[in-house]
Image: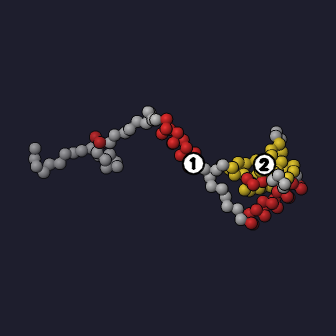
Amino acid sequence: MMPNSHINMEKSKYGIDVRRNVKWKTSMMLTEHVKMLREYGAEVKREPRPDLNEWDLEAIHDCLQRASVQKSDTKIKMWRDGEFFYNRGIIESIDLTRRTLELEDPFYLFLLNLNEIVDVTIMD
């Protein structure tokens, strides 16, 4: 063997020696690890609550009042537990003492919490 000869090693496209490139199989995991991974996945998917200022709250209030008086088709965006929910229908009533809103769609009557509303759109 010549002293200056180099061994022709196969390299992966990442510059890692193929012989040392071990791929670990994840078919067997501890239940604690699976639980932690699921909790992490749920945490990553969480959306932060939108920070609404006075102008935003006033615009939501005006749209709710207009939709309630005109009995317009309305889309309401709500935030609860890190997720956004959308409901669409006609506003039947608004109860400021209980901070609730009744929204009727063709199939169901929803009772929505006013504190969870982050956006209101009149569809008509």
Observer-nearest of 82 and 36: 36
- Indicate which disc, 2 or 1, sits on the residue closer to the N terminus: 1
Using residue 116 as the reference point, say whether residue 4 is left or right of it. left
Q: What is the basis of the colouring in this image?
A: secondary structure
Observer-nearest of 26 and 19: 26
Q: CA distance from mark 2 to mark 1?
A: 25 Å
Q: Residue furthest left?
A: 2
Q: Name the quadrant containing residue 62.
A: bottom right
Q: Residue at x 89, y 56 (%)?
A: 69
Q: Residue at x 74, y 66 (%)?
A: 54
Label 2's element?
Answer: strand
Which amino acid, mark 1? Glu
Q: Residue at x 49, y 35 (%)?
A: 31
Give the x, y percent position of residue 96. 84, 55
Residue topped by disc 1: 43
Give the x, y percent position of residue 36. 51, 42
Give the x, y percent position of residue 6. 17, 48
Quadrant occupied by the C terminus: bottom right
Q: Name the quadrant containing residue 65.
A: bottom right
Q: Residue furthest bottom?
A: 55
Residue topped by disc 2: 112
Q: Residue at x 13, y 51 (%)?
A: 4
Q: Which class describes the residues within 10 Å of circle 2: few (<14), some (14-19), or many (20+)?
A: some
Using residue 27 as the reference point, say whether residue 90 is left or right of it. right
Query: Is residue 60 among the parts visible in the rendering?
Result: yes
Using residue 105 as the reference point, say whether residue 1 is left or right of it. left
